Image (cartoon, grey):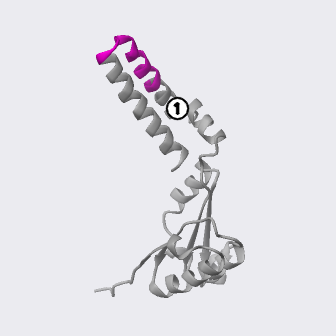
Amino acid sequence: MTVERYLRLIAGLLILVSLALGWWVSPWFYLLTAFVGLNLFQSGFTNWCPMMAILRKAGVERPASYYYGARGPKDLFHLEELEELVRDLPSFAFVPALSEPSDDDGWTGETGLITDVVDRMEEDLAEVDAYLCGPPPMVDAAIPLLEARGVPESHIYFDKFTITAEQ
């Protein structure tokens, strides 16, 4: 779970508990509800919340890497959203790679099949969960690579898809 999810979980729990205590024990507990609400409100503007700092210090964030393979630049999509995630999540890495870049593309990023890129950039993956989504040949090539890098079979999740012909 991410820090943001833990924060929402804790805030929601505090609000529910303070509302219940305010109803059954003392109306003064409603102040805790207001305090949590104000913290959430100000964190929406400042992007800082004391509980988030505590959770980050406790090491709640889990690193994640997203390898995104495509043939050419026109096949890459949602790049703005992915770059925003890179800015917002310090433990998130985004690696786009093109398997068939042309000289006209001006591409300076990673090149080759996405499995080759992962092979070049990763070493020991024994402690990760791997999520694959793509055409069957890509998924079938990635699974043995991940297992060779230490990912247990039980930690590899995948979705194979095919492209339907245009009509």
Whole-percent x and y of residue 26?
35, 12
Please tell me which residue is depicted at 36% across the width and 29% down the height of the picture: 16
Of the pair 70 and 1, the residue shown nearer to us: 1
Q: Is residue 27 magenta?
A: yes
Chain part drawn in magenta: 24-37
As displayed, is residue 127 above or below residue 70?
Answer: above
103 vs 10, left or right, is: right
Of the pair 77 and 1, the residue shown nearer to us: 1
Please tell me which residue is depicted at 51% across the width and 27% down the height of the picture: 42
The secondary structure type at the circle numbered 1 is: helix
How packed mark 1 is, by other alpha carbons closer than 10 Å (few <14, some 14-19, many 20 or more), is some
Please tell me which residue is depicted at 51% across the width and 57% down the height of the picture: 81
Can the viewer see residue 68? yes
26 vs 63, left or right, is: left
Whole-percent x and y of residue 122?
69, 72
Figure quadrant of the C terminus: bottom left
As displayed, is residue 59 above or below residue 43?
Answer: below
Of the pair 157 and 43, the residue shown nearer to us: 157
Q: Quadrant of residue 47?
A: top right
Whole-percent x and y of residue 133?
46, 74
As displayed, is residue 107 above or below residue 100?
Answer: above
Residue type indicated by callout 1: Ser
Q: Is residue 137 magenta?
A: no
Whole-percent x and y of residue 49?
56, 32
Q: Quadrant of residue 94?
A: bottom right
Dominant secondary-structure state across the stretch colored magenta: helix
Q: Which residue in the structure is indicated by mark 1?
A: 43
Of the pair 129 and 136, the residue shown nearer to us: 129
